[in-house]
Amino acid sequence: MDKHLIVLDLDGTLLTDEKKISPRTKKALQQVMEKGHEVMIATGRPYRASDMYYQELNLHTPIVNFNGAFVHHPLQNDWGPFHEPMDLDVALSIIEACHKFSFFNIIAEVIDDVYFHYHDERLIEIFSFWRAFH
């Protein structure tokens, strides 16, 4: 039997509308892993917002976060990481372009650092709350 790599996105693919992995999907993934296939997550989310699913599925593979800008292996520190953030000049030009529009705030993330264009206690509280429980 050929071994296959199954790579899954989270939102709109692996997760239900309630942001859970259905029992049926979890069982199917466990069955394919028992047959020797590899399962991996690739998502636009940061690692802190995807690690609970990695753990729930008991994965042993690398994980792709930030739409490919951060790839690492949570169980093997010597494996990487591979980190390719957006060039600072590009990020600054995007921020400058945003000033032509009405916006509430601009949030940028690099690994687990979060940057806000405008100081906002509510957003800081939300991100701090997320970190405390995940």
Image: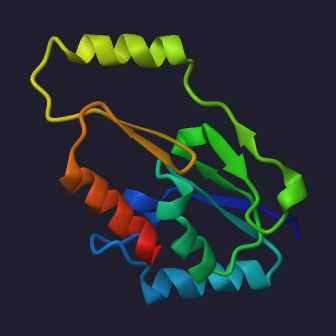
Question: Image quadrant of residue 131?
Answer: bottom left
Q: Residue at x 73, y 64 (%)?
A: 74
Name the residue at the left extreme.
102
Please give left or right for residue 125 compared with residue 50 in the image.
Answer: left
Return the x and y of residue 120 as percentages of the image width and height. 21, 45
The percent position of residue 114, horizontal first and vertical second, equals: 43, 44
Q: Residue at x 29, y 30 (%)?
A: 117
Q: Is residue 73 left or right of residue 7?
A: right
* Occupied quadrant, residue 1: bottom right
| Count of numbered tags | 0
Q: In this view of the protein, which residue sits in the foreground, 45 or 17?
A: 45
Residue 42 placement, left or right of 96: right
Q: Give the color scheme: rainbow, by chain, secondary structure or one colour.
A: rainbow
* Residue 112 or residue 4, whichever sits in front: 112
Position of residue 65 relative to residue 109, above or below, is: below
Seen at 30% across and 11% down, the residue is: 96
Q: Residue at x 27, y 60 (%)?
A: 125
Q: Image height check: is 24 above or below 66?
A: below
Residue 44 percent coordinates (x, y):
48, 47
Pinpoint residue 116: horizontal percent, then vertical percent.
33, 37
Work out whether residue 5 or residue 20 is closer to the camera in this orientation and state it: 20
